[in-house]
Image: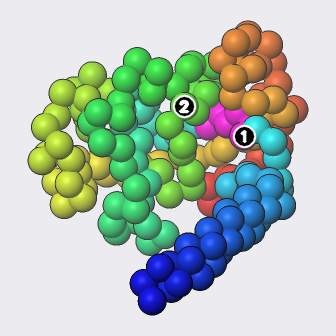
Amino acid sequence: MKTKLLSILIPTALTLAAAGCASKAESTMATAPADNLTGEAQALPAAIVYKTNGDYYDNVPVTLNADRTALASWPAPTDINDTSVPLKFAEGWLLDRRGVSSTTAFLDYTYKEYRKLPASEATPSKLMAHIIPGSEVTVIRRLPIPLWKALEDPVEASKLVDASPVVYQAK
């Protein structure tokens, strides 16, 4: 009886597993990744440049909720490295390498200080106490090139800033 039951269950399980994999692959292939700022499908994420209302170049960005009262997203100290710091462009523009948004604020920790923090110090309640009051992103532009290309040739990328679309402007 066991052998007969197994001879029915094993092929059925294999068929279901294969069907599940195929449908998952098909659904993944059917949609391209979406650009978080515009909702347009793109093969590679576009390079983003931004300005802030203060000199926060070396301060770690975090994402707040819509009403800016709680943390929505923040990096672990181990996520921070030398490639986390934005690149400086002319006229105060910064090339984003961490993922800024309209609800970004900045911590009073520098990148160097933050990466030395014990994980137990990088909790929402503790980090909220380290947000620089009033710190925010004031304008975001999407460059017509992917981030890797902007990093490869920052001089050329910086020339694209003024002609690039504004995707966020503070009120």
Report the span colored magenta: 45-50
Q: Looking at the image, is mark 2 or mark 1 nearer the viewer? A: 1
Secondary element type, mark 2: loop
Measuring 81% from the left and 29% from the top, which residue is drawn there?
145
Kindly report the secondary structure that dominates the magenta region of the rendered protein: strand
Is 150 located above or below residue 133 in the figure?
above
Measuring 69% from the left and 23% from the top, which residue is drawn there?
148
| Image position, residue 43 (x, y; %) | 81, 42
Query: Is disc 1 surrounded by few (<14), some (14 to 19) or many (20+) residues within 10 Å?
Result: some
Left or right of 8 in this view: 144? right
Farthest-out residue, bottom: 1
Q: Foreground: 139 or 156?
A: 156
Measuring 82% from the left and 25% from the top, which residue is drawn there?
160
- For the N terminus, give its image quadrant: bottom left
Q: Is residue 25 magenta?
A: no
| Image position, residue 162 (x, y; %) | 81, 30
Q: In which quarter of the image is residue 7?
A: bottom right
Q: What number is the disc on residue 45?
A: 1
Q: Name the residue under label 2.
A: 97
The residue type indicated by label 2 comes to Arg
Query: Is disc 2 surrounded by few (<14), some (14 to 19) or many (20+) residues within 10 Å?
Result: some
Asked whether the viewer can see residue 24, the reply is no
| Image position, residue 168 (x, y; %) | 68, 53
Q: Foreground: 15 or 130?
A: 15
